Amino acid sequence: MSDLEKLVEETAVELLRIAATELPDEYVEEMNSLMGETRGAVGKAQLKNILEDADIARKNSMPMCQDTGIVAFMVKLGDEFPLRSELKKILVEATKIATEQVPLRPNAVDMFKGNTGNNVGLNGYVPIIYWDVVPGDNLEIIAMPKGGGSTNVAASRMLKPGLGIKGVKQFVVEAVAKAGSLGCPPYFVGVGVGGGEDLCMKLAKNALLKPFKVRSEKKEVAAIEEELYRKLNELEIGAMGLGEGPSVMDVHMEMAARHPASLPVGVVISCWALRHAKATISPDGEVRIDTSV
Ligand code: SF4
């Protein structure tokens, strides 16, 4: 293994450790301020528990939740970065190492043989790796492990195009109302519109990682995000689904063109533990880690 390969592997392990154990500061700050605004004692207590948990996890470098998620990486590979096809093997290996070292709960199940025990499997599909080849010579890796509880409340629907934006908003509200307490709110909600049955879900997942509390630069989309944020909080699901405190921390929407006959909508929901960490690696081995994405 070359020095650069080793560095990428170690960095990916570190990203998985950070993601599992350090809730990003901006979420902690927002939850603290929402706790101050929460009137009911039950809602306050839930937020306090989450914040204490996040604090203990960070101080002791221990996972903030027993479900450390299914491992995913979003990779932006500069077309002049020296490593290419080797990267998948490196990220798979990093996942195995992180499973032992962090440790991460083994969350990859072979339907016929049971848990693979190392968060890797089957047929090269897990860890999930999303590739994007971009100009430049840097490698950017985002580790984004996602828990099963909030993954189970994801939703997608092929709407009739005539329903338009009104139909999209209605579906998102329905999906989050149906999620209720099941995915450990307060939620982060990603909405993907357009593309097709697969791309709308990918767009929704990408939307989760848009900068926290920063609205879309497109004013029509920003207005929808703002309206959804308000409407979803009016559902009063509350912290951990107990009816008090915030239901939703943020909402982002990502759009692609759609087929004239289709209006695909994807809703990807994250629990309060929206875990991610990003590293940018230069060809000469400089590593910059950023937890705010
Ligand atoms: S939904 Fe999130 S907080 Fe709840 S158990 Fe799963 S990973 Fe943990």
Image: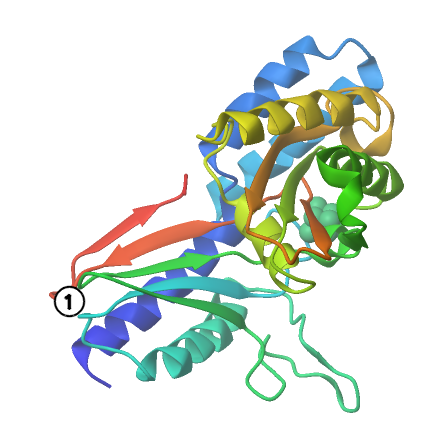
Q: Where is residue 17 in the image (x, y as percent from the top left)?
A: 46, 57
Q: Where is residue 124 in the image (x, y as percent from the top left)?
A: 55, 85
Q: Residues within 10 Å of mark 1 (few under 14, many from 20)?
A: some
Give the colouring mode of the picture.
Answer: rainbow
Residue 189 sits above or below residue 192 on the image: above
Q: Is residue 157 visible?
A: yes
Left or right: where 134 falls relative to 99: left
Query: Which secondary structure lies at badge 1?
Result: loop
Q: Position of residue 272 (x, y in %)?
A: 66, 38
Residue 206 sits above or below residue 31 on the image: below
Q: Residue shown at 52%/40% (left/top)?
A: 23
Q: Position of residue 264 (x, y in %)?
A: 71, 54
Q: Residue shown at 71%/32% (left/top)?
A: 186
Q: Total marks drawn? A: 1
Among all residues in the image, which is located at the extreme front? 260
Task: Decide which of 235, 262 is in the foreground and name it.
Answer: 262
Q: Residue shown at 61%/50% (left/top)?
A: 204
Left or right: where 88 falls relative to 82: right
Q: Residue shown at 34%/72% (left/top)?
A: 9
Q: Quadrant of residue 34?
A: top right
Left or right: where 17 falls relative to 196: left
Residue 177 sits above or below residue 30 on the image: below
Q: In which quarter of the image is residue 37?
A: top right
Quarter of the image for the N terminus: give it. Answer: bottom left
Q: Is residue 62 visible?
A: no
Check disc 1 and report the residue beneath it: 283
Task: Decide which of 75, 167 is in the foreground and name it.
Answer: 167
Residue 265 sits above or below residue 243 on the image: below
Given the image, on which type of amino acid does mark 1 rest? Pro
Dot 1 beta carbon under 8 Å from ligand 1: no
Quarter of the image for the C terminus: give it. Answer: top left
